[in-house]
Image (spheres, grey):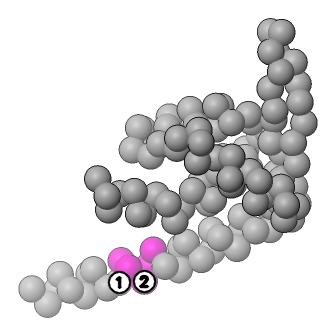
């Protein structure tokens, strides 16, 4: 669904920050957490995450560290204080926009 893709594209940063606000995670773990928390309604291709990680890292929102798990190296991402602040800003903006859209849709429905 192209419309669903447009909605998702605008919320990827918010969703990644929300998931990382719970605990440090590696990329595939984030993908699975998003899928599970959204009951399968929201999925992130793994390739979508890495440009987000790069931007977040450059801006100081996240840091990363490597850990060996079962003889495999995993890169974990950690939400820094600056990232928590950015998450709160995005979340506030999301709720303002969501409420505005809800008001518009209710107004249109009441006119019909």
Instruction: Check residue 103 in the rendering and tell me which mark sits there, or answer none.
Output: 1
Is residue 61 or residue 95 the one in the foreground? 61
| Residue 100 among those drawn in magenta | yes
Instruction: Check residue 100 in the rendering and tell me which mark sits there, or answer none.
Output: 2
Return the x and y of residue 83 as percentages of the image width and height.
81, 61
Left or right of 11 in this view: 20: right
Return the x and y of residue 63 as percentages of the image width and height.
88, 48
Query: From what the image shows, is residue 71 above or below residue 2?
Result: above
Residues at badges 1 and 2 in contact (C-beta under 8 Å)? yes
Q: Residue 64: in sight, yes or no?
A: yes
**Pointer 2: residues within 10 angstroms few (<14), some, or many (20+)?**
few
Is residue 70 or residue 55 the one in the foreground? 55
Query: From what the image shows, is residue 87 above or below residue 28?
Result: below
Quadrant for the C terminus in the image:
bottom left
Please state the extent of the stretch shown in magenta in the rendering. 98-102
Query: From what the image shows, is residue 84 above or below residue 23?
Result: below
Cα distance, mark 1 to mark 2?
A: 5 Å
Left or right of 104 in this view: 21: right
Return the x and y of residue 9 as percentages of the image width and height.
50, 60
Q: Residue 34: in sight, yes or no?
A: no
Q: Residue at x 17, y 81 (%)?
A: 109
Hey, which quadrant is residue 2 in on the image?
bottom left
Q: In what element is the residue under mark 2?
A: helix
Left or right of 110 in this view: 17: right
């Amino acid at each position: 669904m192209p419309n669903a893709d447009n909605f998702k594209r605008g919320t990827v940063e918010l969703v990644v920050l929300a998931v990382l606000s719970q605990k440090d995670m590696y990329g595939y773990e984030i993908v699975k957490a998003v899928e599970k928390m959204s009951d399968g309604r929201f999925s992130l291709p793994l390739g979508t995450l890495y440009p987000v990680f790069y931007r977040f890292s450059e801006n100081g929102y996240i840091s990363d560290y490597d850990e060996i798990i079962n003889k495999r190296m995993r890169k974990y991402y950690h939400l820094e204080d600056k990232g928590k602040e950015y998450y709160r800003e995005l979340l506030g903006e999301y709720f303002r926009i969501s409420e505005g859209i809800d008001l518009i849709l209710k107004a249109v429905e009441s006119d019909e």
